[in-house]
Image: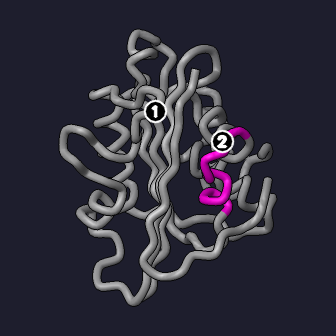
Amino acid sequence: MKHAISILGVAGAVVWGAPAMGATANAPGCNAAAAYYDVVPTSANRVQIGQAVHCLIDAERAKAGLAPLTRNGPLDSAATSHANAAASLKWWRPGANSHNNPQTGSTPGSRITAAGYCPNPRSWAYAETTYTGWGPGAGTPRAAVRWWVYVSTFGHRQIVLSPTMADVGIGAAAGSADPAGASARDGGTYVVDFGRCQR
């Protein structure tokens, strides 16, 4: 079972990009990260899971002729805090807005700004994708990226393959953010924040 939604926020123009899943990116650390493509997040492997998601996203971008994304600390912080809150609060039931925290009221824009991404920009843009899954193979980095690029009809593919996005932050949490998967031991929750900053 899986559930995901995407959201885009823009200050300045964004032009969307092209199509494409499979191989690993040749970025540093991707050979080691491949061991985590089909592993669910735990408190002990979050760094490796985040790297696996990054490598899989960059592999899709490379297949579409797009540049790899640069990992960004503030975006990582925003994505991680939201993934942790979602896995804890479990509000991502079908029809719910996975991007707005019902307890704090935070949104992708407020979290990204509060984390310190792109202060005082000339122009900037951001986008967020979310995913939660449980059951055999559904809570893994590979399942999340495959869903965004090949299954979703909510605009995830355009976000992942946007030629204008340059930075990325990744949050992964153990367990499902959907209450229907609360008792599953093989669940994973993912938040990816994308950004572009011009000063």
Q: Quadrant of the N terminus?
A: top right
Q: Position of residue 43 (x, y in %)?
A: 36, 29
Given residues 62 and 83, the one toward you in this image is 83
Q: How is the image coloured?
A: one colour
Q: Is residue 159 magenta?
A: yes
Q: Position of residue 118 (x, y in %)?
A: 35, 76
Is residue 198 in view from this perspective? yes
Q: Is residue 54 magenta?
A: no
Is residue 78 shown above or below 174? Answer: below
Q: Is residue 182 left or right of residue 8?
A: left
Given residues 178 and 36, the one toward you in this image is 178
Q: Quadrant of the C terminus?
A: bottom left
Rendered residue at 61%/24% (across/down): 138
Q: State the CA–CA distance, disc 2 to disc 1.
A: 15 Å
The kind of residue tagged 1 is: Gly
Rendered residue at 36%/85% (across/down): 121
Locate residue 136: give its quadrant. Answer: top right
Rendered residue at 66%/59% (across/down): 158
What residue sits right under mark 1 in the picture?
A: 95
Q: Is residue 151 left or right of residue 80?
A: right
Helix, strand or loop at disc 1? loop
Is residue 196 shown above or below 20? Answer: below
Q: Is residue 53 left or right of residue 121?
A: right
Q: Which residues are magenta?
A: 151-161
Is residue 50 in view from this perspective? no
**Pointer 2: residues within 10 angstroms few (<14), some, or many (20+)?**
some
2 or 1: tag closer to the N-terminus = 1
The kind of residue tagged 2 is: Ser
Q: Position of residue 50 (x, y in %)?
A: 50, 44
Helix, strand or loop at disc 2? loop
What residue sits right under mark 2 in the picture?
A: 152
Q: Position of residue 49 (x, y in %)?
A: 51, 38
